[in-house]
Amino acid sequence: MAKKAPSTSSSRPLWQTPLPPDVPGAWFDQAAVARVVKALKALRHTKGKWAGHPFELEDWQLEYLVAPVFGWKHPDGSRIIRTVWFEVPRKNGKSTISSGLALVLLCADGEAGAEVYAAAGSREQAKIVFGEARKMALATPALRNGLEILTNALVAPKTGSVLRALSRMAEAAHGLNVHGGIVDEVHVHKSRHLIDAIETGTGARSQPLIIFVTTANDGDETTIYAEKHNYAVQLAKGVVHDPTFYGAIWAAEDTDDPFAESTWRKANPGLGTTVSLEYVRKEAARAKSIPAYFPSFCRLTLNRRIRAENRALSIADWDASAGLVVPEQLEGRACYGGLDLSSTQDITSFVQVFPNDDGTCEVLSHFWTPAETLAERSRRDQVDYQHWVDLGVMTATPGPVIDTRQVARDVIALAERFDIREIAYDRWGASETRLNLEDAGLTVVDMGQGYASMSAPTKGMLDLVMSRKLRHGGHPVLRWMADNLVVRTDPSGNMKPDKEKSRQKIDGMAALIMALDRAMRNGHGQSVYETESLLVI
């Protein structure tokens, strides 16, 4: 499983997504990797002290980019990895390796009529990768003689392939037939339109490859950069599963000393070659003497995002509290439920909390989502919902919206197995579902979503997790939502889940907090309410 790399390494990424050997029939094509290395070595550097020298991959570039991306294959010989997220601080050779790989996809990937695009958020940025590729082609005899090297395009007449710079919005980019895309400096993209156009333009290709290369953004979670970065981190954590997406991120952590050389080496795999130690020392000295420059130094040189969000939990703490939960052993036991219907087009969550006399709680989680829009929302949210449905940890109801009647039937069926004393319910939820549950004899309690109602159970949930007393069984959907959870805090220190600031869905965590509220109000963890002085229902 992919992991967070040890901080003592000078070249390993901080985050690396899983490699795909668990894909049925996956195999590693060493010969394919050797061909890419050979093709890159045929190129010539065009600037700096390396000008005129062959393109020699550094060990970290081979191990963490070229080898996994071009080596892992399906049984039919096609690539498994189709999307690459490669994130390093500036000066680590992003543009050079990007330009080289663009030429590989154009000339050495065995694709007739390949369309390869060097894309960026501005025309000037797009020309950097394309311009470097053009200079490499002019400096490499085989390419200089075999390509038509135009001002705005490189054309391979024998295969009908072309490499172009692309920076216009989706209106000008629709109709692309993309074999390869190099998307540079994703953090400067102000909208997702161009990237969406490139990704949706790969449908007719047998093994398209989109490579994102970038430095960190400033912590803004509303950007396409944040979407892709967070997805890569979620994959690396094991929160979601997608063997077609590969990511490697080098960065310093918030706890690292930004002025220590060990931190610089941790964040910069090319330190000493593509980026000089003297350069980093000068940047660090500037950041130390000019406080206003410190955030830029952290982002550009250490690839450290300055997050504005208030993350509620670390996934390590959540996992440490998982415990073993056996539903059969809970049958007949008293429990409390939380029901969050959210949007009828997204995810409905129902969570049961079973309090124990020793102060621990056991949790069962249930999720529903509409089947008809599953593929579309999987692409939008960058989450493999179908995988969860196949695992049986999420139910897909027929149609374009969630069948709330099925949700009610399923909850009623659970009440036949477990002693559900009360169900907390967002007062803005659908009244029909509430009536169906009440008609079945269940007690449903309205619950507001403001600080007065949510603060005590939110703090109670965090306390239970940190004290390892919330046994949730490691349910993968709830785990994903726990990692997404962001809380909002008012000036008095009250807190509540913040769906607007959270990176992705947190409905299950809202349902868990509501279920805990009912348990606490019925004598389990009542001291939290005494501390908060909140007895509002």
Image: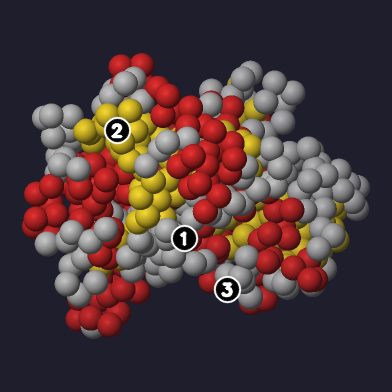
Residue drawn at x 20%, y 47% as measured from the top left: 521
Residue ID for mark 2: 335
Q: CA distance from mark 3 to mark 2?
A: 47 Å
Residue ID for mark 3: 190
**Mark drawn on residue 237:** none
Residue drawn at x 82%, y 68% as measured from the top left: 150
Q: Is residue 396 above or below residue 390?
A: below
Q: Residues within 10 Å of mark 3 (few under 14, many from 20)?
A: some
Query: If the image is split into quadrants, where does the C terminus sit?
Result: bottom left
- Where disc 3 sits, the SS reads loop
- The amino acid on which the numbered mark 1 sits, given as a three-letter code, is Trp
Residue ID for mark 1: 428
Q: CA distance from mark 1 to mark 3?
A: 34 Å
Q: Quadrant of residue 518?
A: top left
Mark 1 or mark 3, which is nearer to you?
1
In-front residue for pair 318/352: 352
Q: Residues within 10 Å of mark 2 (few under 14, many from 20)?
A: many
Position of 492 with respect to 145 (left or right) is left
Q: Earlier in the sequence, mark 1 or mark 3?
A: 3
Rendering coords of residue 443 (x, y %): 37, 42
